[in-house]
Amino acid sequence: MERRMIAPCFVEDTLDCLRRHGLQPEPLLAQVGLPPVITMPITSVQYGALWHAVAQTMDDEFFGEGARPMRAGSFALLCQAILSTATLEHALRRGLRFLRAVLDEPHGQLVVENGLARIVLKDTGGPRSAFAYRTFWIIVHGVNCWLVGRRIPIRWVDFRCSEPLTGTDYRLFFGAPARFEQPETRLVFDADFLKLPTIRDGRALREFLRHAPANILVHYRHDAGLSATVRERLRGTPPSAWPSFEVLAQRMRVSEPTLRRKLRQEGQTYQSIKDEMRRALAMTALRAGRRNVADIAADLGFSEPSAFHRAFRKWTGKSPATFRREAADQANIDFTANALAAATPFPDKHRPVR
């Protein structure tokens, strides 16, 4: 069975789109060889087939989650529109314009500052579902990764909406911190990737479309390829004891040039993988708020706290102290809001929705 699977919650979200439009999901599930009730993860190929069947049935490749339907065939036209671009930035800006013309809302805007590229989603109304935002990111980020032939690592993802019960599955899917109830919905990655050249042609596009969207759900996920193997090896070892690149290659029984080349094809380097993992560990430790920064720096393998301060500011644009203070303030706000909601004397059906 395929190693990378799709959580049942994402299948259920897709089927809910059908139900909201008065369509029964059982015939489509049978059409793609799935049981009427999904309780276990399914393969990316199965989910891709379901995605395609739902989009064709609804004549909407955005599943009714946009202000206007994304008519069947729009995804292929999007790929055609960006095929002639020269760089990732050129392709991303053109693709976002295309999606705005098709969907109206949500629409994305690329903001580049402080070494980070942020795709910010705009909406005139209230927040949409987490599933709607996730679908937008799959389309945009998946196509861009294919266009440049490598995975573009995500720094973090923010959602305007409240966290669904399956919020953990969202974090696992993106392989990056996912925060909910934020001021804006955005996906963030290193701005250096915007300079990457596009490498696909018409022949490659025809092959890509034959297997979409299952291929973008598999090939450019954070847990795909050799970089996932490297992360798994590091995960069981304290950062201060992580091996050198030379030792890592020896343990993996692969030559250094081959390992370096294959990681580069996936949009990674050994240093970028270590940085991603250190950043995630640092953010978790700072949110916990119990240990001093010097101890956190030592645990992460930094020779002195000042080196950790410089690295953390490069990763997040903030000092560790600022990040910890903002995380504590947000936690206090959430606690107060929840306490007030619990104390509201009105019945649930009259309680305002956050």
Image (tube, rainbow, N blue to C red):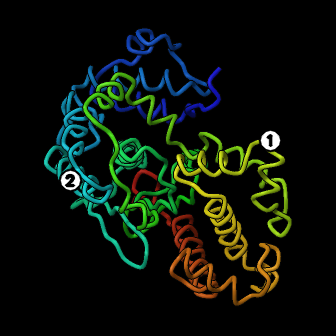
Q: Is residue 106 visible?
A: no
Between 60 and 235, the one lying in front of the other is 235
Of all residues, the one furthest to the left in this rendering is: 101
Between 325 and 188, the one lying in front of the other is 188
Q: Is residue 193 visible?
A: yes
Residue 303: % across, % down? 79, 83
Residue 247: which quarter of the image? bottom right
In the rendering, which numbered label is found on residue 253? 1
Q: CA distance from mark 2 to mark 1?
A: 43 Å
Between 142 and 134, the one lying in front of the other is 142
Q: Label 1 crowding class (10 Å Cα cut-off): few <14, some 14-19, many 20+?
A: few
Q: Residue at (47%, 53%) from the top-left corner?
A: 152
Residue 243: % across, % down? 82, 60
Residue 189: % across, % down? 45, 63
Secondary element at image label 2: helix
The quadrant in which the N terminus is found is: top right
The quadrant in which the C terminus is found is: bottom left
Q: Label 2 crowding class (10 Å Cα cut-off): few <14, some 14-19, many 20+?
A: some
In the rendering, which numbered label is found on residue 94? 2
Amino acid type assigned to the residue bearing label 2 in the image? Arg
Q: Residue at (63%, 84%) from the top-left corner?
A: 320
Residue 47: % across, % down? 47, 26
Amino acid type assigned to the residue bearing label 1 in the image? Arg
Q: Is residue 62 left or right of residue 183?
A: left
In the rendering, which numbered label is found on residue 43? none
Between 63 and 87, the one lying in front of the other is 87
